[in-house]
Amino acid sequence: MLVALGCASGRPKNASVAGPTNGVDLELLRDQAMDSMRARAGIRDLSLAAVVADVNGESVTAADYLRACVSRYGEPAVGGQINERVLFTELKARSEKPGENGEKYAVTDADVAEGERRLIEENPQLQGKRQRDLLEMLKMTPEYFRYQVAINVLSEKMYEADNEVTDPKQLNPMFMGIWAQNLAGRYKSTSRFGPEGEDLGGDDFATVGDATITTTDVAPLVLAGLSVPRREKALDDAIDQALVRQELAARGITVTDLDVNARVEAERAKYRGDLFGYEAFLPFLDTTLPLECQKFRVWIALDKLFGEPTDEQVRAHFEKNLPYFGSATASACEITALAVDPDTEMPKTPDAWEKALARIEKPVAELSSGGDFNQLVMRFSEDGPDVKKWGETERTKDRVAGYIGSFACRKGRPEIDPAIEALTFALRDDDWAGPVKTSRGYHLIRCCEASPPRPAGLEPEKFTDTNANQQFDWQEPLTVDHNRNGKFDDGEPFTDSNQNAKWDAGEPYVDQNGNGAFDPPDEYQDLNGNGIWDGPEPFDDSIPNGHYDVGCRDQVLDDYLEDRAREFVAGLRAKAKITKHLD
């Protein structure tokens, strides 16, 4: 979705603002766009009551299946729908209020054509493609693509007016994103979560103004881009949810909306005041609430069934999985021989795996003879141009080909394929190994840089509570740690010529690090409102790593609950009678 991705569509600055009679009917355009996407995804002809699977004699409906598709794969689509609805609502409001000269916000056919031209011009991966191939790449219909371009053109008109833009180069996507976030604040996105205990099991994700965003709104955008294997995974999710409902009903265990409310509030309470914690995650929680509530319902039900986890169980889980609760990170490059089609995720031919293994042996032989990994990436790797690319490593700033980025070692929720993750962490810097098999094909992996796991403590370290607020104040959370040293820097001494308590360009300063520029203090959040950065309170560094460790009990507990839920569902599946009807 272009709005969600922030792609610029644009128009020349001197383009006229069309009157209502000459403008595109945005509401009609949106209806046509959504109808076309429903047809593409096969939803328009799909009855929501249709049976897609039988689970122990109980029906799983198409509505259950669509909800599972959105829950598993629809996070970007949900966020994009909310952004789009905010923009649509604002545009509609502005179009009904003429400006000083009687003009209204609108977009003409010429504006859309210019927007399409600029979109392709500014995105190299879209250049040189036929319209059919372009739409297939974007997973859009012509009607939906046209609607997205129109929304972006009108958004730029609003942005220009609000920010007095005089040069098209000022249409910076980052600043437009910030502007859009501020705009969204006028249309509170209200989820179905609330202290009164609303029905949390419905299809509604959020409301924006007077518009409600439902599963059936988002599902076409998700389904249109899903491969057959991913659709099957979503169907399995719907089946698992049916199994859980059946088992809980058989055991007489009920979980009310108020139970879920209390659990959500408990999760929020863990992170209050933490800039990088759950508070920053709340908008995301609101837009994906059905998925979160389903997880909380299972956890609460298992607490009622097995009892809440004991300290002994949590500690045993921590000790068993200690490496995953540290902070190991690594970055790597890869040479890939694909066995599956990236779009369908299905083998290209019956013998695709054997052929991929044979092809990967060629770069293996050259690497074994001292070949350059970067050059071999460009010659042999079969990933597309967006993956087979040059990148800069984070620590050494080396320029490397086939870069797949930096990732953390995470149990159960790896940031990259588990096989690639395991191999990378087993290598030393600049070593390579392989081939390793993944769901996509065979890979040769070169470890660019890795950091060993930092020891983690289950419980917080002891500290001196200087201000008696019953929490450790280690420093105001940094929002921009410029030199990545993990602490606030006071800045270099300077002469405050105009006595405004900050350094102004041109004032004399002492260039302590000899880089030819003044380095201002790192930015920070003043949590206690005292106007200064607060240093850390004294603490007992029982894990000798030079900083205070808050303990990872909450993380361990969440991981334990995830494992328990997976084991519970696997046990139900092992004895269930399941028949799938989805083609």
Image: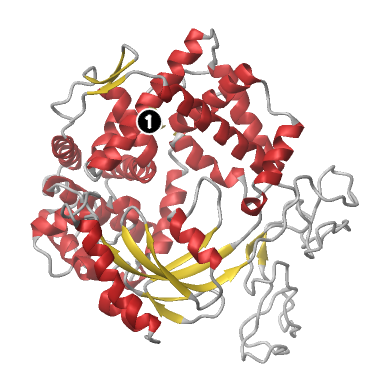
Task: Give the percent coordinates (x, y) of residue 425.
Answer: 55, 64
Residue 43's place in the image compared with 449, above or below, is above
In-image side of 458 versus 118 (left or right): right
- Disc 1, SS: helix
Task: Give the percent coordinates (x, y) of residue 5.
Answer: 33, 55
The amino acid beneath tag 1 is: Asp
Crowding near the residue tagged with mark 1, few <14, some 14–19, many ≥20 C-alpha atoms within 10 Å: some
Q: Nearer the viewer, residue 113 or 325?
A: 325
Q: Quadrant of residue 330?
A: bottom right
Q: Quadrant of residue 206?
A: top left
Q: Quadrant of residue 444?
A: bottom left
In-image side of 307 versus 64 (left or right): right
Q: Nearer the viewer, residue 3 or 328?
A: 328
Q: How many marks?
A: 1
Q: Nearer the viewer, residue 524 or 451?
A: 451
Query: Looking at the rendering, in which quadrant would you find the C terminus?
Result: top left
Report the residue marked by disc 1.
237
Which residue does the image show at 88% across and 49% down from the upper left? 467
Which residue does the image show at 66% across and 41% down from the upper left? 556
Task: Give the percent coordinates (x, y) of residue 524.
Answer: 67, 62
Colour scheme of the rendered structure? secondary structure
Q: Nearer the viewer, residue 80 or 215?
A: 215
Q: Is residue 508 visible?
A: yes
In-image side of 70 versus 313 (left or right): left
Which residue does the image show at 78% across and 62% down from the upper left? 547
Task: Give the percent coordinates (x, y) of residue 421.
Answer: 49, 59
Which residue does the image show at 87% across and 50% down from the upper left? 462
Residue 575's place in the image compared with 377, above or below, is above
Residue 377's place in the image compared with 149, above or below, is below
Q: Is residue 272 visible?
A: no
